[in-house]
Amino acid sequence: MKKVPLIGICRHRLTTDGTGVTTLVAFHGCPLSCRYCLNSQCLRPDGVWQRLSVEEIVQLTVIDDLYFQATGGGVCFGGGEPLLRSDVIADFCRQCPPEWNICMETSLNVPLARLQQVVPYVDHYYVDVKDLSPDIYRSYCQADNAQVVANLGFLAEQGLQPKVTIRLPLIPGYNSDGDRLRSRRQLEQMGYSDFDEFTYQLPDVGHEDVLAVDGQDEGALTAKGLLGQRCR
């Protein structure tokens, strides 16, 4: 039975990643090395909380089915980069109740085939593009953003813009309001209209991620970053 590494499963979330009551399932691993990574444990070999099979993830989330059904909620996949586990997510969606609202927090910096695997199942995407300038993106994420732009183009070609919220952060020391406006205008030309604009709060010097299992909720994880308003 295939098991995948996670940095946490966080239950009973409201207003942060989807409609209604939501459970965040956060995967270990990411193709980026962002300078101010909120969940840096996803990049560390010792940052794995548990390794679980699809069936085990379903078991840990279905316990809140009543809340999901009553509020129009469901599961949000994050990380790390959840699309690195697109096959697992697609398998999960085939097993979970079809009424669940499935969301995803993603950088979209993955091969198109991984995105295509989950398109039939995802109700909403939260896409953290950082900045569409290749130079700014490379400076901050230490990676190229050509695949991000290509995947945004694919979603637009499918007419899926209404299912996408674009996160456009102001990153102190890396981009400006003018840079963000240029990114927004480029995205508007692609048909995107739902934007979440905010400013990164810089981490404290010497900040360490702290993981602890919440004893009140079996299968819940309390973690700096995971319980924040956004995963980035």
Image (cartoon, rainbow, N blue to C red):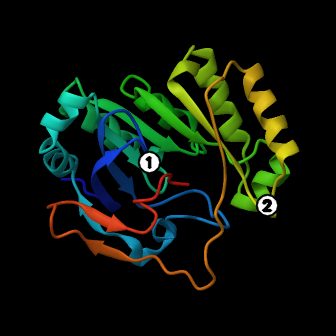
Give the residue displayed 84% in from the left and 36% down from the top.
182
Q: Quadrant of residue 195?
A: top right
Q: Secondary structure at mark 2?
A: helix
Q: Position of residue 12 (x, y in %)?
A: 26, 49
- Residue at 27 percent across and 32 percent down: it is 93
Figure check: 227 above or below 121: below
Q: Position of residue 220 (x, y in %)?
A: 23, 60
Residue 3: percent from left, percent from top:
25, 57
Horizontal and vertical percent position of residue 56 = 16, 51
Numbered label tally: 2
The residue that label 1 is drawn on is: 82
Image position of 69 (left or right of 146): left
Residue farthest toward the bottom in the current orientation of the protein: 206
Give the vertical position of 220 relative to 56 (above or below): below
Mark 2: amino acid? Ser
* Real-space CA distance between mark 1 and mark 2, rounded to the nearest whole angstrom: 23 Å
Name the residue at 42% across, 31% down.
117
Query: Which class describes the residues within 10 Å of circle 2: few (<14), some (14-19), or many (20+)?
Result: some
- Type of residue at label 1? Pro
Label at residue 96:
none
Q: Residues within 10 Å of mark 1 (few under 14, many from 20)?
A: many
Please give the residue where the numbered disc 2 appears in the rendered image: 139
Q: Residue at x 25, y 30 (%)?
A: 71
**Quadrant (top left/top right/bottom left/bottom right) for the C terminus:** bottom right
